[in-house]
Amino acid sequence: MTTTTTHISSGTSSKAAKQVLSLAEQFAPDQALIMICEPTGQVLTLNKNFRYIQQKTNTGITNLAEIIPDENKSAFFAAVKNLSGKNRMQLLLNNLYGSELPFLLTCSCLKYNQSIFLCCILTEEAPRERQLPAAPVGADYKAIFENSLDCICILDVEGRVLDLNQAAQQIINLPENKIAGEELGTVLEFSPFEKNLFRKRLREVLQGEEVKFDWWLKDQKKELMAAEIILKLAEFSGKQVILAQAVDLSNRITAEHHIRSRNSQLEFVNHLLTHLAIFETNEEILKYTLEQLLDKTHVIGGGIYMYQEASNQVNLLFASGTNSELLMQYPVVPLRPDIVEQISRHKILKTKEALRYDFNQVLPLDNKVLMPVCSDQGLTSVLVLFLHNSRKKNASLVSLIESIGNGIGQYITQHNLNLQLRFSEIKYKNLFDSATDAIILSDGSSIIDGNQAVKTLTGYAIDKILNKDLLAFLSKGQPTEVNKIRHYFEKALAIGKPVVFEWKIKSSRTTPKEAEITFNRLLIENNFYVQTIIRDITQKKQAQLAQRKEEVLRESISQFRDFVSKVEMAYLSVDTEGNIK
């Protein structure tokens, strides 16, 4: 990451940061505290664990610098500026959020949608119990010396052999009695030039330095082998000696190759999973995965088969590269009836074996590798991958493909869940906005959201009253009315049950309205909010008033008739046109 970072606009950063957080949660431990920040340390979003511990400890965080000790800040943020996608940095934090255990802060740099984010993960370090082994003495030292896989010789200050272990004796391939007392250069058949150079190295050791250099030795088959020679001063039987150790570089080179290969694989998987958030469907995710495998691995062709549970078969969705035409000849591969019971994301090897039998019936090729993709709900798809030849199908590549298949399966599980949540969110948002009752959501008494009906009933659009005090808004600042409505509000917060009462909505922008107000206490992400529902009951009140007037009129007429019946007089009831009723 360079010192000039991509600008992140506030309008898009929140959405992008939440997508980066969703990805980070899939790979972090369950109890990890995760925050996504700008490169400056400004916090954009926190995961549920982080928000919970802040609420529990009554704390907050707006910048990463707030949890970094003062003595580490300058060095820490200097290192942050040099972070790239290929490395990360860690810092141990003590006394954080009242924990007795230290937290390990791990920071990595992620680039998403042309913006750079800092992903910070806090994990609690478990206490470790260390048992120190007893120091070997006497014969134990001899056993360690003899059983070492490296060649070790004990030389005197002139370079003559005093003792050597079994590994060294196998390379020299001479009886021990013919080696003892001889110069090591003579035993190993050094040339005069090599002997002088070796003696120079011995003199450097006698000056107190540990000397390391590469050398060529002959193994048991008299073939040259690269070795690293390590010379250092030691004490043997009360005398100053030189300890000579030869380490086979071929083993180290092989190990380093495996490490580099594994790091490249992890980098590829991280790159792949990081870029999946831009895709909407499972099919797009799988196509991108196949394209990346074709571009960055030994895979030369392949196809995507989607599983159809109803027909218990897989149908070809897409094919590319070598053998794509062959795959198109088999658009459908039927599976055995009992195969569903054998397929599971948690038993990937058993799943591959079960699928291999069915695919071998139609594609009996040795250079193919199957990559089943299973979500938590079961088999989603099978990627058939082709290599240049079967010899490329080594353990490293198979491990990479299995890792990708498992990672894609986990991502699809989370992706499908996010789609369901998004659908539910849209559905309930539409219900919220289309409601005829005005609905206001407040954090305490501060208004934070509302629907379109708020303007109809109060005359104010929701964006005009955001962050205003709900109680003052409803009472128009009248002290007696504020106290009355606060009583209902605090009652709803205290008992956790709906509180319903009638109220008159007064506004200079609309005619006064009779309303029924309901306060509901809601728990959202471990925080209490208040939902206020305002229902216009003006027409209901008018109808009730008209009905009451009619009842009073009927009662008056009834009383009048009763009175007239008791006196001697005649009366007629006529309508406005003179007709007798």
Image (cartoon, rainbow, N blue to C red):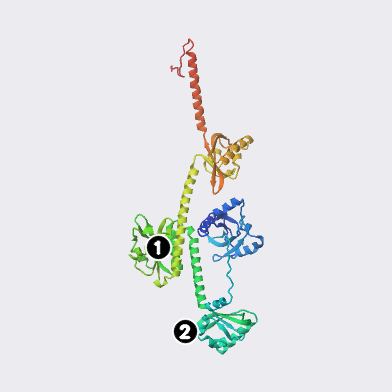
* Image quarter in which the N terminus is found: bottom right
Q: Which of 237 and 402 is in front in this view?
A: 237
Q: What residue type is labelled 1?
A: Lys
Above or below for 328 versus 220:
above
Which is nearer the N-term, disc 1 or disc 2? Answer: 2
Residue 107: tell me if it is visible.
Answer: yes
Above or below for 244 versus 381:
below
Q: Nearer the viewer, residue 31 or 485?
A: 31
Answer with left or right where residue 314 lies relative to residue 470: left
Residue at image location 46% in from the left, 14% down from the top: 572
Answer with left or right where residue 235 lies relative to residue 425: right
Q: Position of residue 245 (x, y in %)?
A: 56, 80
Can you tell which mark lies on residue 350? 1
Residue 389: tell me if it is visible.
Answer: no
Q: Which of 484 and 561 is in front in this view?
A: 484
Q: Nearer the viewer, residue 536 or 382?
A: 382
Q: What residue type is labelled 2?
A: Lys
- The answer to the question of whether label 1 and label 2 lie on touching residues, with beta carbons closer than 8 A, is no
Label 2 secondary element: loop
Residue extending farthest front: 138
Answer with left or right where residue 394 lies relative to residue 19: left
CA distance separating discs 1 and 2: 44 Å
Query: Which residue is under mark 2?
Result: 221
Residue extending farthest bottom: 192
